Image (cartoon, rainbow, N blue to C red):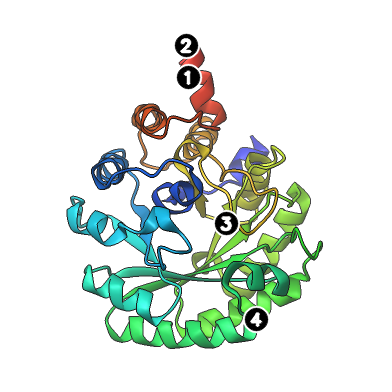
């Protein structure tokens, strides 16, 4: 009872599967399949959905049709539909598709940042500043991803003071929320707990989200530790899809079903229908022709749910 009492009453899930999940899948879904996925996630009760990214198709060909997806989804006025934008050209494309919620990104590791977007952290920061200024002038809400905060596959340990410094810069620009990412699943429960506690002390609860990968099976333990120190926003990917093409060893994101199941079992409200999530994952597995990694979904397919 004591541990449960420390948990928040409600946790918001930011669904990143249609972007962060699908961008690393071998099979490229059609526009119609992606639209169905986003519409089904909306119907399941998710209130923040990352629909896609406006990046050059040379780099992420799975996202080449993001504009067509945005043009076709049924937009619920109570749902925030997000797009990742790497630069001003990406922002212009997003605005042309009447996107009002955009995300920017950079790494807390110089090497990973160079491998990912071929820029130093300082160079990325200046480009992001331009994008944030332009986006906010158009009335957009901006979210900021910081990658590899609990360890980098190239550099090893990451100085969390650097993470906090990058976060402060993003918030000073006008970013409304920071999503700190365990990009390769290197984080441990106590490390994640302490890092999240420091970030909340520095920036406040409303400014922080946690983005976890389940590479070593610690994502749910890490999430629980983060919730106990005040985190109330978690990124997750339907079916546990995803990874990072520029981070060796990065397996899928923590599964949305797994997170919702854990929160349901802990008495934490999400407003999300877990039975609907299982149906979505089943359809997604058929569409992708690949086995999904979500533990709760695999459990359900064994006939236990």
Separation (CA) of disc 2 from disc 3: 31 Å
Q: Is residue 78 visible?
A: no
Asked whether the residues under the numbered discs 1 and 2 touch, taking CB atoms below 8 Å apart as contact, a structural biologist would say yes
Would residue 286 be found to the left or right of residue 163 on screen?
left
Q: Which residue is mark 4?
A: 120
Considering only order in the chain, which callout, 1 or 3, is on the residue closer to the N terminus?
3
Tag in front: 4 or 3 = 4
Q: Which residue is mark 2?
A: 303
**Picture coordinates of residue 98, whole percent (x, y):** 21, 69
Asked whether the residues under the numbered discs 4 and 2 touch, taking CB atoms below 8 Å apart as contact, a structural biologist would say no
Depicted 216 relative to depicted 207: above or below:
above
Considering only order in the chain, which callout, 3 or 4, is on the residue closer to the N terminus?
4
Considering only order in the chain, which callout, 1 or 4, is on the residue closer to the N terminus?
4
Considering only order in the chain, which callout, 2 or 4, is on the residue closer to the N terminus?
4
Separation (CA) of disc 4 from disc 1: 44 Å
Asked whether the residues under the numbered discs 4 and 1 touch, taking CB atoms below 8 Å apart as contact, a structural biologist would say no
Considering only order in the chain, which callout, 3 or 2, is on the residue closer to the N terminus?
3
Depicted 43 relative to depicted 191: above or below:
above
**Picture coordinates of residue 283, whole percent (x, y):** 34, 29
Q: Which residue is mark 3?
A: 210
Q: Which residue is mark 1?
A: 300
- Count neighbours of disc 1 (C-alpha within 10 A) and say few if under 14, some if 14 to 19, many if 20 or more: some
Tag in front: 3 or 1 = 1
Would residue 291 be found to the left or right of residue 123 on screen?
left
């Amino acid at each position: 009872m004591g541990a449960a009492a420390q948990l928040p009453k409600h946790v918001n899930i930011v669904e990143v599967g249609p972007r962060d999940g699908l961008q690393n899948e071998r099979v490229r879904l059609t526009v119609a399949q992606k639209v169905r996925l986003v519409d089904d996630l909306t119907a399941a009760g998710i209130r923040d959905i990352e629909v896609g990214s406006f990046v050059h198709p040379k780099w992420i060909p799975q996202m080449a049709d993001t504009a067509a997806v945005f043009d076709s989804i049924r937009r619920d006025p109570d749902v925030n539909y997000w797009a990742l934008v790497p630069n001003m050209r990406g922002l212009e494309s997003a605005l042309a598709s009447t996107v009002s919620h955009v995300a920017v990104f950079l790494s807390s590791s110089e090497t990973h940042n160079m491998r990912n977007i071929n820029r130093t952290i300082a160079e990325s920061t200046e480009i992001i500043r331009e994008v944030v200024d332009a986006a906010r002038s158009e009335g957009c809400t901006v979210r900021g991803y910081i990658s590899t905060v609990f360890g980098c596959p190239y550099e090893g340990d990451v100085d969390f003071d650097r993470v906090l410094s990058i976060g402060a810069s993003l918030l000073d620009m006008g970013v409304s929320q920071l999503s700190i990412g365990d990009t390769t699943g290197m984080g441990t429960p106590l490390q994640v707990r302490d890092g999240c506690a420091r970030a909340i002390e520095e920036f406040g609860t409303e400014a922080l989200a946690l983005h976890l990968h389940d590479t070593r099976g610690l994502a749910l333990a890490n999430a629980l530790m983060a919730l106990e120190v005040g985190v109330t926003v978690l990124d997750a990917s339907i079916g546990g899809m995803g990874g990072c093409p520029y981070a060796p060893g990065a397996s899928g994101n923590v599964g949305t079903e797994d997170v919702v199941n854990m929160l349901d079992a802990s008495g934490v409200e999400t407003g999300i229908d877990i039975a609907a999530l299982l149906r979505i994952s089943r359809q997604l597995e058929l569409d992708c022709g690949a086995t999904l990694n979500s533990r709760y979904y695999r459990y359900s397919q064994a006939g236990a749910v």
